[in-house]
Image (spheres, rainbow, N blue to C red):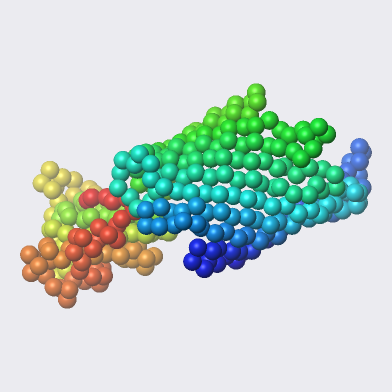
């Protein structure tokens, strides 16, 4: 696939090839033929965006010119291979409408398409249909969408089209990483309802401000596990937690209410061969995790960049860290 754009003009080419091995057997289970069924599609695309401005995204008009070939070996079924050409047409516009949140993205999209308009393949009509749809986000976490699809035929008396169908759906972002979605489709006497959810954790940020030993264990566990799952990991160290990241070693205290449990916890971790928190964090850093020290609290505590050990990558301000953490899930420890 190749695409490019010159100002408001876009163009591209693409290809798709699918093949499936096929074996035919007779009624006695003996193989009588074999081969490969294949489909090849080559597409050329052009689009242009009209009337775009600062307040209006414009009206985009596009078309696809497609050539398709279906190959069915004669040994499997003779006379079924076919070559045909077809076109798609579409128009799309995006703008703001009853928008109750601040964002540069437009909250309403309207579109219409005609797809697979073209020559019959060996006397068989193509699955040609027209569609109209919209997507609307009245508030930031909610998106509503609907499509109306109308199949049609150039020879309806001999090749009647399928009945029209309508599909609608909604998506609700409960958190930055958890989304629920639902959909409904009606086509004749076959209504369908679907429900689902999605969990996407591709970035986590950990704000480490506690200075007691019990809090550093989950820091190491979370950072190591997330980095091992190929997630982006950012750790922001502030407050009394900074003492644990200096070159001069500090004995991390346990909270008074858990002091009696400290020996048993240390013994259990050693018996289970659990790595110390700083070793887990080093393993996370080896997988791409980053550790930042808070600039304000470092200054308050008289700590400079040379006072920190090799776990700390740099000293940054809160605003800088929040920009880095944007788009992910944040944990406070």
**In the rendered view, does 322 fall on the left or right side of 257?**
right
Residue at x 92%, y 38% (from the top left corner): 28
Q: Is residue 159 above or below residue 95?
A: above
Residue at x 30%, y 47% (from the top left corner): 102
Judging depth in this view, the residue of 324 and 252 nearest the camera is 324
Q: Is residue 173 visible?
A: no
Can you say which quadrant of the picture contains the N terminus? bottom right
Q: Is residue 81 above or below residue 7?
A: above
- Residue 315: horizontal and vertical position, in percent? 20, 69
Extreme-bottom residue of the structure? 306
- Residue 199: horizontal and vertical position, in percent? 42, 44
Residue at x 65%, y 51% (from the top left corner): 88
Judging depth in this view, the residue of 77 and 68 nearest the camera is 68
Judging depth in this view, the residue of 10 and 33 nearest the camera is 10
**In the rendered view, does 29 fall on the left or right side of 317?**
right
Q: Quadrant of residue 3?
A: bottom right
Residue at x 7%, y 69% (from the top left corner): 302
Q: Quadrant of residue 305?
A: bottom left
Q: Is residue 182 above or below residue 80?
A: above
- Residue 12: horizontal and vertical position, in percent? 60, 64
Q: Is residue 225 above or below residue 149?
A: below
**In the rendered view, does 262 fall on the left or right side of 103?**
left
């Amino acid at each position: 696939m190749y695409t490019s754009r010159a100002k408001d003009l876009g163009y591209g080419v693409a290809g798709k090839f699918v093949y499936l091995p096929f074996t035919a057997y007779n009624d006695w289970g003996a193989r009588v033929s074999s081969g490969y069924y294949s489909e090849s599609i080559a597409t050329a695309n052009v689009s242009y965006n009209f009337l775009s401005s600062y307040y209006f995204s414009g009206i985009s008009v596009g078309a696809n010119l497609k050539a398709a070939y279906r190959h069915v070996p004669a040994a499997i079924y003779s006379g079924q291979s076919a070559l045909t050409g077809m076109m798609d047409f579409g128009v799309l516009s995006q703008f703001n409408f009853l928008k109750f949140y601040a964002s540069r993205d437009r909250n309403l999209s309207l579109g219409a398409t005609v797809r697979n308009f073209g020559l019959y393949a060996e006397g068989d009509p193509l699955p040609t249909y027209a569609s109209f749809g919209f997507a609307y986000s009245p508030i930031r976490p909610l998106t509503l969408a609907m499509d109306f699809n109308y199949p049609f035929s150039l020879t309806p008396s001999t090749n009647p089209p399928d009945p029209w169908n309508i599909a609608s759906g909604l998506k609700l972002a409960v958190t930055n990483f958890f989304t629920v979605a639902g959909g409904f489709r009606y086509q004749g006497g076959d209504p369908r309802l679907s429900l689902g959810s999605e969990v996407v954790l591709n970035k986590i940020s950990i704000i480490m401000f506690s200075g007691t030993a019990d809090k550093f264990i989950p820091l190491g566990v979370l950072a190591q596990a997330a980095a091992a799952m190929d997630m982006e990991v950012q750790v922001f160290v502030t407050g009394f937690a900074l003492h644990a990241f200096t070159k001069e070693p500090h004995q991390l205290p346990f909270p008074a209410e858990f002091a009696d449990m400290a020996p048993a916890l240390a013994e259990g971790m050693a018996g289970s061969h659990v790595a110390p928190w700083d070793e887990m964090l080093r393993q996370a850093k080896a997988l791409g995790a980053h550790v930042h020290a808070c600039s304000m609290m470092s200054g308050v505590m008289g700590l400079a960049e040379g006072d920190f050990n090799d776990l700390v990558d740099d000293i940054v301000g809160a605003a800088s860290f929040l920009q880095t953490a944007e788009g992910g899930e944040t944990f406070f420890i």
